Every structure is written in structure tokens, then in C-alpha cells.
Amino acid sequence: MIEKADIVIIGGGVQGCSIAYNLAKRGQKNIVILEKDTVAHGASGRCGAGFRQQFGTEMNCILARDSVKIFEQLSDELEYDIELNQRGYLILAYTEKEVNQFRKNVELERSLDIPASLITPEEAREIVPCLNTEDVLAATYCPTDGNVNPLLTTFAYAEAAQRLGVKLYQFTEVQKIETDKHGIREVLTSRGRILTDTVVNAAGGHAREVGELAGVEIPVYAQRHQILVTEPVEPLWAPMLMSFSRNFYFQQLPHGSILGGYGDPEHEIIGHDTGTSWEFAATMAKKMTSLVPILSNVRMVRQWSGSYTMSPDSQPILGEHPQLERYYMSLGFSGHGFMLAPITGVMMAEYIMEGSTCLPIEKLNITRFERGELILEPSVV
Amino acid sequence: MDDNTIICRCEDVTWGEIRKQLDKGYMTLDEIKRITRAGMGPCQGKTCQRVLLHAIARYLNKRVEEIQISTYRPPTKPVPLGVLAGGQDD
Ligand SMILES: Cc1cc2nc3c(=O)[nH]c(=O)nc-3n(C[C@H](O)[C@H](O)[C@H](O)COP(=O)(O)OP(=O)(O)OC[C@H]3O[C@@H](n4cnc5c(N)ncnc54)[C@H](O)[C@@H]3O)c2cc1C
Ligand code: FES
């Protein structure tokens, strides 16, 4: 292992790999990624990797929109087919409150050039003929939302970063970050030490612990989130189906399987558990078969889980830690950290190298919690 | 076994595709599965996992026990969603 680095990135998930790639692309040298397992072993390899631009705050709309722009050309840029699909997200409204919120969301989205629209249940059925629209009052649809293959995308970033000189050490766990009055001094790992004055915490579900390794507090925690997949079947419908009030998301992937889950913040295990429960499979199956009845005969083949990294407002924390100079963070993404990785990787690289960013980053600073300036995003699962 | 030998019949993955990833430095069964889809088909690796493990071990000059096998996504016995949901709806 090398003895010295200019920047040490902790975590080989999509965030760490995107940041490393974007730093190297801008000419930064001597970058190291440390990953305690293998690349994409964390949430990045376990997620649905759906991306949508339909949010309720201007900031999230812009971040998502600009991330999608990057996704659209990422296979070419990284020279790796990341299996991008833009088959839309159809988000269903079941309450008047939701309809009102969606009306506002669509107005905001359209003002930002996101091609979303508010549609009737009948129009929703034209897009998804097998959809049961009982109780559906309205829906929003954005045809340029979609999904990528999460594993291939993370590997694509990791390989492109390495081609630009980034060193990746897998099976290398960070165990301590030594500091002194000048800041960071070195990173101690299970395989030796690396002298550095700059660390990026991209440790996903372990972000709080990786804060503690440097003696800084980061108010996030990991919570289990489950997902299941069915056997592949013939093409049934195209977009992601999603609802906030009924709490589900599922879609048919290009090769035919149907993948989806729901959030259960009240009952799900807090911590790093990656087991699965029968209750989840049964509940998810109910949600799926009642919305798309022809799924009754389709068989589930696997279920698994990963961690959401939850922050107090379910929005990411980006930037430098106020208690430790050159200790950067890109974490706390809740359930939408994959889709943002292309743009947050760029922003973090700009921030670390130049101190300023193409899109405003200050709102996402960790100090917002102390200031009481939480980001109130109405449209998250 | 040559590059055209099909290792995973469900997902139609050849030894050549797997060897390419081993040459790039991927070395755990999880990684190989995730990239090539070998072992992720309807039989969930029942047919191909052993063959795959042995082929990887031989190619990397390692013992089979040294190859990291899958740590998550336990294969379940395929069950229709309608049964999971508690009986056919209507
Ligand atoms: C079931 C599920 C579905 C999801 N669906 C979506 C979706 O559709 N769209 C979307 O945008 N997002 C989704 N997400 C969220 C998304 O997966 C995450 O926000 C994103 O992957 C976070 O990436 P990351 O790189 O920050 O974290 P991770 O991918 O978790 O990477 C962190 C890495 O750090 C490593 N690490 C931790 N501690 C140490 C240490 N001490 N030393 C060295 N390495 C360490 C870990 O091993 C891990 O590989 C979903 C998440 C789950 C669990
Ligand atoms: S033969 Fe490989 S999954 Fe069935």
C-alpha cells in the first residue's frame, strides 16, 4: 500500500467512486479510495438505481435534472455500458393533499425544464394498461426519468477513476483517522497507514462511525431497507410505479424482472443489518398484486436489503466538517443517493479543489441542523 | 473449456465473458455475478455456481475455498406474488 496520498476517500460506493473520478478528471493527483469490502458492496450495489426529477424542492429538482444530463452521456464518458433506460416514473396520488402537492411540484418542475405533467387516472392507464387505478385521483409522469444498472455504474466510475491514476484498495478498512491541531495527519487502516491531510467520508451507512474515527460528530444513522425481485417475464409496462402515501415503488427492468420495495421507517431495523423479513415480502407482494393484478402468478426469486443513510431531514450532507479542516463529507442520502451521485461527485470535486461549485452547495452543509434550516422535501419515500 | 463455453445457461454467460472480468482484477463471486449476471437466472445458480467457482479458482490459481462467495441475496424458492400476498386476489 502507498504511504502518502493527497486525498483519501473512504468508501467504494457510487459516491466515493464518482468523487474520485471527478477529482482525477479535473487533474487532481494522488487520490486513494479505501473500501473495507469490494466496490458496490454497500447500498450502491443493493439499490434499485432508479432516477427521477420529480421532487418538491427547487434544489432537488435541479440536482436531479443535472444528474440525469450526466447519466445520459455517462456510458460514453466512462467507456462502459451502464444500461441506462429512460422509461419514465409514474407517481400516483391517492389523496387531495397529494394532488395539490403534485400540482405545485409539476409547476416547479416545468419552470426548470423538467418535462413532467399532471395526468388523469385514464391517462395513466394509457401509459400502463395493466394498472389498477382504483382510488387513484391523479398522477404525475415524467418520461425522461429512468434507471441504470447500479453495479455496472459503480464499477464504471471505479474503473474510469483508476485509468486516471486513482488507487483503489479493497478489503481495506479504515480504523482511525489521526488528527492534531493542524488538522488531519494520517489514516490508519487494516493494512497499514497512509499520510494525508484530506479525507472524504463517503462511507454510506457507516458514515457516523467514520466520523467518530476522526472524533467528529455526524448526525446520521443507518436503517435497513428491503427490496425484492421477480423472475423475468414478458414486457408488461414501462415506467417506474410509485406512491408516497401508499408507500411503494416498483418497475419492470429491461430484461423482464420486476424490482421494488417500500420504506418502513417505523419498523425497520436501525443499524447495519442486511437480513430480510417474510413480512416485507408478503406486504410488498400485496402492494404489487393489488396495483397490477396480473402479477399474481409472477414468482419472486430473491429478496435482499441494504442501508439507507438517514439524516435529520433525509437530505444529503455535503461539504467540509466545521470541527475538522479538510474532512469532507458526501453522505446521508436517504433513499436517493444513487441518482444524485453523478452531480454530487462533480460538486464535491469542485468544492475540494476550488472551494466553489457549479450548483449551490451551502444549503447542504452540515451546519444547517444547528441553524434549524432543515430542507423540507415533501416528495420522498 | 474455451471462451465460448457457456457457464451459466440461464443467463447465457460464456467463460470468455467471465475470464475478461477476472483479467480486469475482479476476483470474488459476487463481483463476477454482478457484472456478468452469471448465477442470477431463474435457477439462482443451482446449476452454474459450482462450475463457476471451480473455473474461477483454477484460473486464479487459488483453492476453491479462497474464492469469496456470495454474502447476500439469499436465493429463495420462487413463490408467486399472489401466494405471498395471501391468496389470489378476487
Ligand atoms: C433497497 C434500497 C433501494 C434503493 N433505491 C434507490 C433508488 O432507486 N435510487 C436512488 O437514487 N437511491 C436508492 N437507494 C439509496 C442508494 O443506494 C444510496 O443512497 C447510495 O447507494 C449511497 O451510496 P454511497 O456510496 O454513499 O454508500 P455505499 O454504497 O453504502 O458505499 C459506502 C461504502 O463504504 C464502505 N465503508 C464503510 N465504512 C468503511 C471503513 N471504515 N473503511 C473502508 N470502507 C468503508 C462500505 O463497505 C461501502 O462499500 C436505495 C437504497 C437501498 C438500500
Ligand atoms: S444456470 Fe446460472 S443461474 Fe441458472
Image (cartoon, coloured by chain):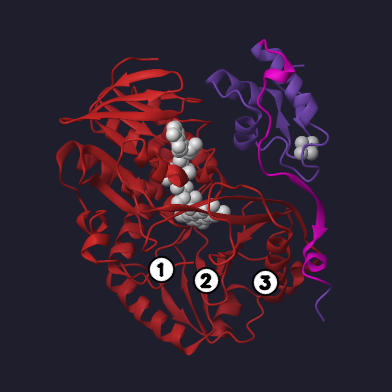
Mark 1 sits on what residue? A54
Q: Which residue is mark 3?
A: A287
- Image spot of residue A62 (x, y percent): 30, 61
The residue mark sitting in front, 1 or 3, is 3
Q: The disc numbered 1 marks a residue on which chain?
A: A
Dot 1: within a 10 Å radius of its alpha carbon, few (fewer than 14), some, or many (20 or more) residues? many
Q: Position of residue A4 (x, y in %)?
A: 28, 17
What is the display colour for chain A? red
Amino acid residing under circle 3: Lys
Q: CA distance from mark 2 to mark 1?
A: 10 Å
Q: Secondary structure at mark 3?
A: helix
Distance from mark 2 CB to nearest ligand 1 atom below 8 Å = no
CA separation in Å, label 2 and label 3: 16 Å
Instruction: Judge whether residue B79 is colored magenta.
Output: yes
First reached walking from the N terminus: tag 1 or tag 3: 1
Tags 2 and 1 on a common chain: yes
Magenta region: which residues?
Answer: B61-86
| Residue furthest top as drawn | B61
Residue B62, placed above or below residue B75: above
Callout 2 amino acid: Leu
Camera-nearest residue between A352 and A88: A352
